[in-house]
Image (cartoon, grey):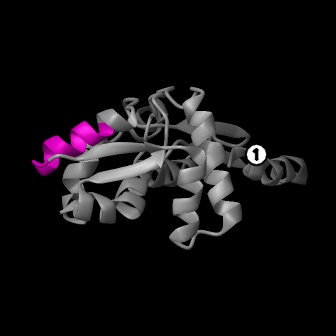
Amino acid sequence: MARLHRPAEAALQESGLRWTFLRPNFYMQNFSRQFAASIRSAGRFAQPRADAPISFVDVRDIARVAARVLTADGHDGRVHALTGPEALTYDAAAGVLSRVLDRPVRFVGLSDADARAAMLERGLPAFHADALIEVSRAYRDGGAETVTTTVRDLTGREPTTFEQFVRDHRSAFV
């Protein structure tokens, strides 16, 4: 996905306009939007196989950072990497879901081919499925585990933990 976004960033940088880039990691809301139905019905969620931790970030924290950046000086020409406060593997995320929902939830790691087929079956366009597989490969190779203090530094608030996110969105999973 970053490869797809980079040309737009480069165009902005070269435009002479003022710019600030927010670069969030994997959204926690992907769990409530993409995985909730299978968590509700089968107690599981599936993604391409990946054991590396990911510093999931809540979009509410991204919005708070965006509000700050848009209303305060000093952010022109800056890039802000946004993460949650911890990096979790999908198995660890399933553990949090299990604990908060008080029922077993498990992560099912799929091969890239099986994950792509499942995405296409759900109606995702091939281009989007391929981009998500590419993101999963990047996560699998590591690099998504970095945790930044940017949310706290810019908002004065601790970023939302994955556990708090699940508590706040419990109704999506039950």
156 left or right, relative to 4: left
Q: Is residue 158 visible?
A: no
Judging by the rendered image, the residue that carries numbered circle 1 is 3
SS under mark 1: helix
State the image coordinates of residue 125 (x, y, percent, origin top left): 65, 69
The quadrant holding residue 124 is bottom right
Q: Main secondary structure of the magenta part?
A: helix
Q: Nearer the viewer, residue 172 or 155?
A: 172
Taking the spot 62% from the left edge, 59% from the top edge, the residue there is: 129
- Taking the spot 44% from the left edge, 34% from the top edge, the residue there is 55
Magenta span: 93-103
Task: Find out whether residue 54 is within the magenta segment.
Answer: no
Using the image as rendered, state which of residue 46 and residue 10 is in the foreground. 46
Residue at 38%, 44% (x, y): give it: 108
Quadrant into which the C terminus falls: bottom left
- Seen at 88% across and 54% down, the residue is 15
Crowding near pointer 1: few (<14 within 10 Å), some, many (20+)?
few
Nearest the camera: 55 or 137?
137
Q: In this rendering, would 154 be left or right of 19?
A: left
- Residue type, label 1: Arg
Residue 50: percent from left, percent from top = 49, 34
Asked where in the image residue 137 lies, by quadrant, the reply is: top right
